[in-house]
Image (cartoon, rainbow, N blue to C red):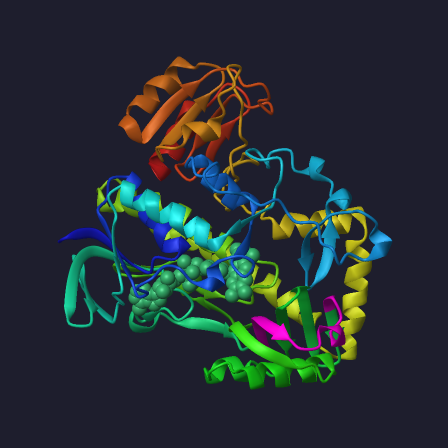
Amino acid sequence: MNHDVIISGAGPVGLFLACELALAKCSVLILEKAEDPHSPLKQLPFGMRGLSAPTIETLYRRGLLNELEIHKQLKNPHQNAKHGPRRQVGHFAGIPFHDGDIDTSQWKYRLPSSTDPSLLSEMAELESILARRAEALGVEIKRGLALTGSHQTADGVTVQSGDRSFKSKWLVGCDGSRSVVRKMGGFEFAGTEPEFTGYTTRVDIADPGKLSQGRMVTPTGMYLQSQPGYVVIQDFDGGAFHSAEKPITLEHVQEVLRRVSNTDVTISALHIATTWTDRARQATTYRNGRILLAGDAAHIHAPLGGQGLNLGLGDAMNLGWKLAATIQDKAPEGLLDSYYTERHPIGAQVLDWSRAQVAIMRPNPDSRALNAIFRDLMNTRDGATYMAGRVWGIFTHYNLGGDHPLAGHSVPNFEFEDGTRIGGLMHDGHGILLDFDMNASLKMLTGEYGDRMKYVSGRAKEQFGLSAVLIRPDGIIAWASDNAPDCSEFQKAAARWF
Ligand SMILES: Cc1cc2nc3c(=O)[nH]c(=O)nc-3n(C[C@H](O)[C@H](O)[C@H](O)COP(=O)(O)OP(=O)(O)OC[C@H]3O[C@@H](n4cnc5c(N)ncnc54)[C@H](O)[C@@H]3O)c2cc1C
């Protein structure tokens, strides 16, 4: 075998997964279809992506957060005047929620690495940081080579790219929504069909005064002019235009914009345009033998509320250490399968979140009535806090069983008396046994796992009543104890994950 893993696709998910595998000393080759990683759709303002709390934690735990030039949520100039100077920090189905309404004190274990639970970053910048890191860790990236086929046997995968072939032990499809790996790898992609085609465009408008500023809901859909010339349109055509894969011409965009805005606005130039839909589909399994899926290759949904990148990076963080342990024959029984059992439900929740938004955006009286009720609810403190918690991934956790309420949750960013924070000790991707009470038995047991589990002891400024915490390489709490730790429970958890 030439490589441990071939990854198809050098998008953010493929790149981050490659970094995780290389960090664990696996050899990785990425095949990327596009010759040039630069695309205007990945740059401002189109390439702006909202990062959720789990993504911010993930980047922080690998020492990448500081590298990323983070853009704080911009003040929305089109806020409803009634809301005064409140800052819009997210939306559900286009209904804004504002920072002053959110009760973050309810989330005491979260928001560890940043004062802001939701940040914006540019796709182009994120991808170039991840590509640099991947290459520094020894990942080989071949651009301009599309995966065109694959064949797996009991001990490896042969990957085709035109007339070239490559061999590896595993193949991971991170090749986006139209994934070739998924289509050729025998995966079922189940879900619901779209109701609209969305357009993201940069245009010159001859008579801009004919369009209103901000987000306008109309009898046939919605249009939004976020800044002059940047127009987003939602046309409830059943997704027909996007599905037809026709070229997006100036004439077509003008016709749609005129119809949706109910004006005779004239577009004098079309610079950039892309379409998307609310089709919501998810692979019914994320693994077929030696072939795995992650990111948009495994699940697609409308970009409403911006969740796809966050979901995909969560897949990569979850899969990386498990696949590496499997390759290195260190994985306990069932470890790799837990990638699917943990991540599939999180993906399903995001698909439903997207469907729920479409249900109150449809241009019909029922949806408008429901939309008005949601608007009222989101103007309450509890409503805004709930929405922000969902959109920012605050409630995301895995059901790992066990007695402790924190098992399966992201570890709080404990700060030690010398100012070190636990997240800062995770750059190497190893597990950690965090022992606040310096228990000699726990220390000895941790030693059995070599460098896969580090022993860290010391008093933290805030310990939330805990005495010891076992942290997986992805920052998830595998086991925790409030009192004198039960070593046999610790051993069970350690054996399950390490
Ligand atoms: C308008 C819009 C706004 C969005 N806003 C947000 C947001 O605010 N927050 C958020 O979290 N998400 C957002 N998303 C979603 C997010 O951009 C995607 O979920 C994310 O890019 C998925 O990453 P990925 O690496 O899985 O796939 P992609 O980014 O699609 O990358 C896949 C890569 O695979 C390559 N490839 C394809 N086929 C092959 C092949 N056969 N062989 C080799 N390589 C191949 C492609 O060239 C590409 O580089 C938005 C999406 C859109 C369309």
Q: Give the residue at the far right of this rendering.
A: 82
Ligand 1 lies in quarter: bottom left
x, y percent for residue 420: 48, 21
Q: Give the residue at the far left of this rendering.
A: 1
Q: Which residue is pictured at 55% across the width and 80% down the height?
A: 239
Q: Which residues are magenta?
A: 195-215
Residue 64 visible within the image: yes
Give the quadrant of residue 354: bottom right
* Residue closest to the eye, 298 or 78: 78
Q: Which residue is pictured at 50% across the width and 39% down the height?
A: 57
x, y percent for residue 119: 58, 46
Q: Is residue 267 magenta?
A: no
Q: In which quadrant of the rendered image does the C terminus lie?
A: top left
Give the quadrant of residue 406: top right
Q: Which residue is pictured at 42% across the width and 40% down the height?
A: 474
* Residue closest to the eye, 247 or 421: 247
